[in-house]
Amino acid sequence: MSPPLILLDTNALMMPFQFSLDLEDELVRLLGEYRAAVPSSVIRELEGLSSTHSTARAALQFATRFPVIDVEGVGDDALLSLAQAEGAAVLTNDRDLRRRLRKSNLPVIYLRERSRLEAVGLPPG
């Protein structure tokens, strides 16, 4: 069985710079093996934010560590559609997106207590 696919949203890519969190180490702690990817809609959003936000610039550079999956559309809708199509978990701290993902029975990984990641809905593995 292949490792779970984790889609990183915009605020997930900013977590390392906002909370001094080693995102990759935390994902290993939580999941063991995993595959992470960034939807192209997230890259476009970070590019738009990077002209005025240094955290977005840093997140855009950090995103180069992960493969980019080309998607149609923008924002949460594009991310949700991709997660459904791929059967992927989404790493996000966006409350509305987390609620929508859970309503669609998709796994969610989020930041807990500003220091560690927690997962909801991932199959035991």
Image (cartoon, rainbow, N blue to C red):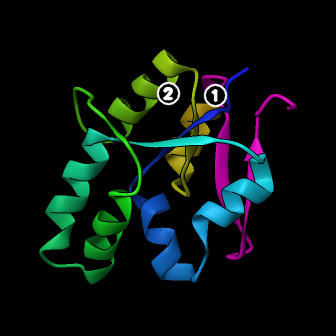
Q: Is residue 89 above or below residue 113?
A: above
- Magenta region includes residue 117: yes
**Looking at the picture, how far across and down is residue 91, in whole percent?**
57, 49
The stretch of residues the image draws in magenta is 103-125
Is 52 left or right of 105, judged from the image as shown?
left
**Looking at the picture, how far across and down is residue 17, in whole percent?**
46, 80
The type of residue carrying mark 2 is Ala
Quadrant of the image containing the N terminus: top right
Q: Which residue is drawn at 61% across and 72% down?
A: 22
Q: In this view, does 106 lie above or below 42?
A: above
**Looking at the picture, how far across and down is residue 81, in whole percent?**
41, 23
Identify the element where label 2 is drawn.
helix
Is 19 left or right of 57, judged from the image as shown?
right
The type of residue carrying mark 1 is Leu
Q: Mark 1 points at which residue?
A: 106
Q: Are marks 1 and 2 in contact (CB under 8 Å)?
A: yes
Pointer 1 local density, CA inside 10 Å: few below 14, some 14–19, many at least 20? many
Q: Name the residue under label 2.
A: 83
In this view, the residue in front, 30 or 11, is 30
Identify the element where label 1 is drawn.
loop
Is 42 left or right of 113, judged from the image as shown?
left
Quadrant in the rendering for residue 39: top left
